[in-house]
Image (cartoon, helix red, strand yellow):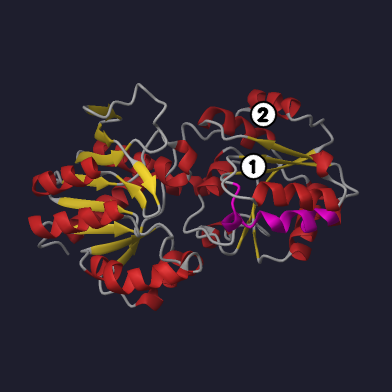
């Protein structure tokens, strides 16, 4: 008989804080999958990104897909995410669980969870989710490297195991020589939500002004330097003779959107570009279904949820070789993974425009269903418990 594990998922953001990107979606899907397997799953999180959602209470437990979710008030300052009530809750209740899974590093709130787990004598698993990658250390390195050696390294070395979402992320972190074993379990996606919507896709194409002969290119996610979107203007300059339209869906997180507009203006193609603010799952599913090709030229992604979401909706993808899920895509779509060179991307996009590949929902996406991912995570949890093997 399967042992029911009492799991505390400790994360700064959680569903439905979609504006923070993939982690909120994938963590909530994993938790729902674990609950469906029979584990007792509790989430301690904050209301970050949900401040204007009165239906998300901060003074009582919320049941979401069989998971008991506790939202605590949060603020941001120069140190990052702050939530004294979240930290107090984990300090008080750490002993109630068999295992604590902490998502994220660098945050004071995460440090509180590590400390509480040690005091309660409970094993903990840590998910860096890309925050220990080389790109991350190039952002404010004057602060991160001292903090890593003085504080974060000890927190990570105290973990029962480290969870990575891709083989690339695991290999990248070997340089840090951390003691705990690392295991790979990918992010999960909701295959019921990410599904091709033919009628919705046609309507979406009309909304963005794309005719039947227009080849629609799509990017979805934060518009940020990390996402490498500055590669696209010089790449698309090589296909100006083709009838394409580029659509960016997502919140503007830094000056990248203004730089993109300037880049497309410089190649005389700004009138072919549309920016749409962040949108919910249903609307984004319509976008994936209506687009002809999804572009993801990121400088670094520990996984890359958006690529799998697009494939689940039947949209072909081209991603950079710095996206964690790249090793999976290379086996299912020729030319899907490219180095970050505008000339190579321009040539690949031209081939896709000329070939106009048929709509196919890749069988690959089944590997990322909530049930499959939750089963793999549950097995890793069992190995992380005292006496596990």
The residue nearer to you, when weighing 14 against 347, is: 14
Image spot of residue 221 (x, y percent)? 57, 44
Query: On the image, which quarter does residue 174 sit in?
Result: bottom left
Dot 2, how many residues are within 10 Å of its Cα: few (below 14), some (14-19), or many (20+)? many
Dot 1, how many residues are within 10 Å of its Cα: few (below 14), some (14-19), or many (20+)? many
Label 1 sits on residue = 315
Which residue is situated farthest in the right direction here? 241
**First in sequence: mark 1 vs mark 2:** 2
Image spot of residue 134 (x, y percent)? 48, 70
Query: What segment is highlighted magenta in the picture?
Result: 223-237
Who's the residue at 56% across and 32% down the image?
A: 279
Q: Is residue 167 above or below residue 212?
A: below
Report whether residue 368 is seen. Answer: yes
Q: Secondary structure at mark 2?
A: helix
Who's the residue at 91% across and 49% down the image?
A: 241
Q: Secondary structure at mark 1?
A: loop
Label 2 sits on residue = 201
Q: Is residue 190 above or below residue 139?
A: above
Q: Is residue 60 above or below residue 214?
A: above
């Amino acid at each position: 008989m399967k042992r029911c594990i009492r799991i505390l998922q400790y994360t700064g953001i959680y569903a439905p804080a979609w504006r923070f990107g993939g982690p909120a979606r994938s963590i909530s899907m994993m938790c729902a999958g674990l609950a469906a397997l029979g584990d007792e799953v509790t989430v301690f999180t904050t209301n970050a990104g949900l401040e204007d959602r009165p239906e998300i209470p901060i003074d009582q437990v919320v049941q979401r897909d069989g998971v008991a979710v506790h939202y605590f008030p949060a603020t941001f300052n120069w140190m990052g995410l702050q939530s004294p009530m979240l930290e107090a809750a984990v300090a008080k209740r750490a002993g109630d669980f068999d295992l604590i899974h902490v998502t994220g590093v660098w945050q004071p709130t995460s440090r509180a969870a590590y400390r509480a787990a040690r005091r309660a004598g409970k094993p903990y698993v840590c998910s860096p989710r890309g925050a220990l990658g080389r790109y991350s250390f190039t952002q404010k390195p004057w602060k991160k490297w001292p903090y890593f050696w003085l504080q974060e390294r000890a927190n990570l070395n105290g973990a029962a195991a480290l969870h990575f979402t891709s083989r690339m992320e695991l290999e990248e972190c070997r340089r840090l020589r951390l003691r705990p074993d690392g295991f790979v379990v990918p992010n999960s996606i909701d295959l019921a939500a990410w599904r091709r919507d033919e009628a919705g896709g046609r309507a979406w194409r009309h909304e963005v002004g794309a005719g039947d002969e227009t080849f629609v290119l799509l990017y979805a996610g934060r518009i940020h330097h990390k996402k490498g979107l500055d590669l696209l203007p010089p790449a698309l300059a090589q296909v100006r003779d083709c009838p394409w339209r580029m659509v960016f869906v997502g919140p503007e997180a830094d000056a990248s959107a203004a730089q993109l507009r300037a880049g497309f203006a410089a190649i005389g193609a700004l009138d072919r570009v549309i920016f749409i603010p962040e949108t919910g799952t249903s609307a984004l599913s319509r976008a994936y279904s209506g687009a002809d090709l999804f572009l993801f030229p990121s400088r670094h992604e520990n996984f890359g949820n958006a690529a799998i979401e697009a494939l689940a909706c039947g949209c072909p993808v081209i991603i950079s070789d710095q996206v964690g899920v790249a090793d999976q895509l290379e086996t299912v779509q020729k030319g899907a993974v490219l180095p970050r060179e505008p000339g190579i991307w321009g040539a690949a996009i031209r081939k896709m425009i000329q070939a106009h590949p048929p709509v196919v929902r890749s069988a690959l996406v089944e590997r990322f269903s909530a049930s499959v991912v939750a089963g793999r995570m549950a097995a890793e949890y069992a190995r992380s418990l005292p006496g596990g093997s």
